[in-house]
Amino acid sequence: MRTGIFMLVAIVVLQLCSVLLGWAGLLIQAAMAVFAAAAVANTLALRIFERGGLDSIGLGWRPGSWRNVLLGLGGGS
């Protein structure tokens, strides 16, 4: 049951994000759609079954998060 709900949410969000990001180019569309589908499916699964959030799996914003984002963006440029 839990796996089925997770898979259903992931597939629906993946399809929705793929359509919404069609303007961004194939590489960005593919990467962001998969990330969004995984983040949303994990968040909903944690909320429904464990009463947690993205912080529970290490994806929360911490004081050093913006620094890491800026370093990643700078390194990728």
Image: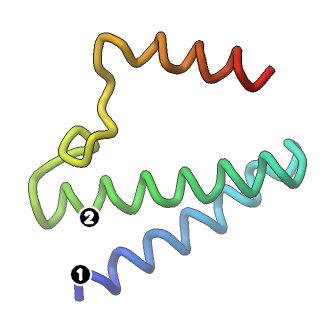
Q: Which residue is mark 1?
A: 2
Q: Residue furthest front?
A: 75
| Direction from residue 74 to residue 72 in the image, left or right | left
Q: Amino acid at mark 1?
A: Arg
Q: Where the C terminus falls, by quadrant?
A: top right
Name the quadrant containing residue 69: top right
**Residue 24 in the image: x percent, y percent?**
85, 42
Instruction: Say which element carries label 1.
Output: helix
Q: Which residue is mark 2?
A: 45
| Direction from residue 29 to residue 45 in the image, left or right | left
**Residue 3 in the image: x percent, y percent?**
30, 83
- Nearest the eye: 32 or 18: 32
Q: Residue at x 59, y 13 (%)?
A: 70
Marks 2 & 1, CB-CB < 8 Å contact = yes
Q: Compared to 21, does 14 lie above or below?
A: below
**Residue 66 in the image: x percent, y percent?**
46, 13
Q: Residues within 10 Å of mark 2 (few under 14, many from 20)?
A: some
